[in-house]
Image: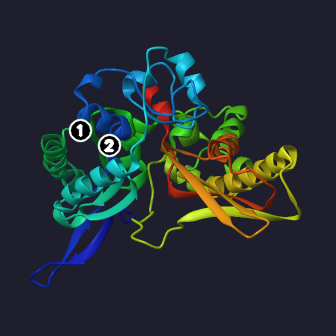
Amino acid sequence: MEDSNRFCNQSDAGNFVWMFRVIFHLDMDAFYASVEQRDDPALRGKPVIVGSPPTRRGVVCAASYEARKFGVRSAMPSVTAGRLCPKGIFVRPRMERYKEESREIMRIVAETGAVVEQVSIDEAYLDLSDLCRAENPDEALAGSQPIAQKLKERIRSTRQITATIGIASNKLLAKIASDFRKPDGLTMISEREKLQFLRPLPVRALYGVGKATELILNQAGLRTVADLQDYSGDLRALTGSFGLRLKEFARGEDHRPLHLGDEIKSISGEETFYQDTEDRRVLRKCLREQAADISAKLKRRHLGSHTIQVKVRYSDFTTLSRQITVEEPISEASDIYRLGCFLLARDRLVSRPLRLLGLGVSSLREPTERQLILL
């Protein structure tokens, strides 16, 4: 059988040569909080929580690793974060500062000569297949490690923050590798060892397995990737058409290319009321339904969102929109709904009857699988 990670390309001399896929997944470590700790040395080593203070209605946008140890996470109400981490230092988000820092980092990434898919402000896939030619796939992967190490060192020396890189033959494995050892990690999953590497991981570690799919698999006795690899039945009976891809993922196979601009950018919904209203029960019900619809669409596409936006239109057709960005991608309807409610309350948008209410998400990417930290 042909190696699915091998393809033919034309060399400079005009001859055709075999190449093997080499994919990096670059993930900045606790990006927002790391920028704050770098810019203010007094915050280094402290549990930093980027978001509104717990004394005010607000949410967490990001948390340093010191704060994450207490269970603090993105999209969590600030009052809950304050209760979990009493000594947490709350810092207001500076999105323009983070965007500026992201641009500098991506300039460094571009210097590698790789094909780059930037999937969020602090995350990117790099295809280095053309730069790491070798006789077999594992030699190609091993030959890319010095490039990864130099990239990490360059980001650390010029930007004074750390990055974690995962190396593998496809996006699935590269992402798992980068989640495996954080912060400041570098992990390679070889083709020879990928099946064994995946076996102890929980099923949730695989791309596309969310809470609902995990529950279905667990109820069938499938808790680890090893269980999926050894399963003799048809996974489609449990997970529908996704079962075929899930079996491939369990074997470490993933044929998804890098997306360089055609991917979906946002998902939204809005409702124009029959009569203008400021009834909180009506507005909450509307927002809850929109959040559930958006969440379902995100999960069908196996995506999470960094940015949540609300839109309101008043009787005189004045239209306003407000948004908030969190560091970790979210896809649960409850999180989307809570952030939508927060935006309406924070900016007092329901100060008079509404003609229209809308909810949307953007800055879409694959959700992070934090279960790998258990390893």
The reply to whether dot 1 and dot 2 touch (C-beta < 8 Å) is: yes
Question: x, y (%) of residue 111?
Answer: 16, 61
Q: Residue furthest right?
A: 275
Q: Quadrant of the C terminus?
A: top left
Give 98 or 25, whichever is nearer the viewer. Answer: 98
For label 2, the crowd category at 10 Å Cα-Cα, with few meaning under 14, some 14 to 19 and many 20 or more, is many
Q: Residue at x 23, y 70 (%)?
A: 18
Q: Secondary structure at mark 2?
A: strand
Q: Which amino acid type is marked by label 1? A: Ile
Residue 263 located left or right of residue 79: left
Would you call the spot at circle 1 few (<14 residues within 10 Å), some (14-19), or many (20 or more)?
A: many
Q: Position of residue 194 (x, y in %)?
A: 37, 43
Judged left or right of residue 160, residue 176 is: right
Amino acid under disc 2:
Met
Residue at position x 35%, y 41% in the image: 178
For marks 1 and 2, the one nearer the N-term is 2
Report the residue marked by disc 2: 28
Q: Which residue is mark 1?
A: 161
Which residue reaches farthest top?
86
How far apart in space, not on screen, are marks 1 and 2 (Cα)?
A: 8 Å
Query: In the rendered image, which quarter is residue 6 located in?
Result: bottom left
Residue 20 in view: yes
Extreme residue in the bottom direction: 14
Dot 1 falls on a residue whose secondary structure is: loop
| Residue 290 percent coordinates (x, y) | 75, 55
